[in-house]
Image: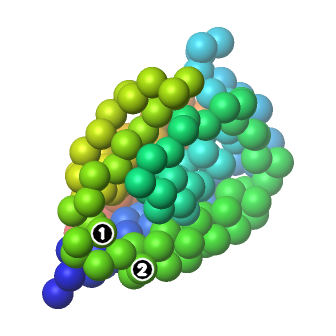
Amino acid sequence: MSIADGFIMELEQESAATRRVMERLPEDRLSWKPHPKSMSLGQLALHTARIPGNIANMLSADITEGPKGEQAEAKSRAEVLDALTASVTEGTARLKSWDDAQMMATWTFTMGGRTIMSAPRVGMVRMIMFNHLYHHRGQLQVYLRLLDVPVPSVYGPTADENPFA
């Protein structure tokens, strides 16, 4: 089993949990923000959906310049779900393309020509592809709770759903 194979299995499992959260997005509240400094529900959902593919593409080069611009806001739940499907497909394809040597190769992230971080690609896959995805998925669950939308189970029971009952 290659390093990437383990990540691919994790992406398949975790994308199903992410999809369950995104299927609950209330379409009439996509512009809602819990705080003025927060992303809107639609921005956060679309950003989260695009993480696997976007990060995998960023990690494809040995050196990547940081992105610029504002986060787009989803117009519908279907847009978010379609983005998630496409992103997981892209992320999986990129992971499959890397052998163990490429996974262990150094990747560098820059902004304005200045190095922000540099580490083996495998660590960046864990940190900015997967951990980043889980962080934002958790934020989406909080948004759902604040909007009084039933929160789906991800790893175990929520106040609304118990997969073990």
Quarter residue 70 falls in: top right
Residue pointed to by mark 1 = 102
Q: Is 49 situated left or right of 153 in this image? A: right
In the rendered image, residue 157, in percent from the top left (x then y), is placed at 28, 55
Identify whether 56 is placed above or below 36. below
Q: Is 90 situated left or right of 76 in this image? A: left
Q: In what element is the residue under mark 2? A: helix
What residue is drawn where x is 26% and y is 60%?
A: 105
What residue is drawn where x is 23% and y is 72%?
A: 101
Residue pointed to by mark 2 = 97
Residue furthest to the front: 113
Q: Quadrant of the N terminus?
A: bottom left
Give the alpha-carbon distance from disc 1 to disc 2, as whole Å.
9 Å
Q: Earlier in the sequence, mark 1 or mark 2?
A: 2
Q: Amino acid at mark 2?
A: Ser
Within 10 Å of disc 2 (Cα), the crowding (few <14, some 14-19, many 20+) is: few
Whether residues under marks 1 and 2 lie with C-beta atoms below 8 angstroms apart, the answer is yes
The answer to whether residue 98 of the structure is visible from this angle is: yes
Q: Is 144 situated left or right of 122 in this image? A: right
Q: Quadrant of the C terminus?
A: bottom left
Residue furthest to the top: 36
The answer to whether residue 132 of the structure is visible from this angle is: no
In the rendered image, residue 69, in percent from the top left (x then y), is placed at 71, 31
Quarter residue 59 falls in: bottom left
Q: Amino acid at mark 1?
A: Gln
Q: In what element is the residue under mark 1? A: helix
What residue is drawn where x is 50% and y is 45%?
A: 64
Of circles 1 and 2, which is in front? 1
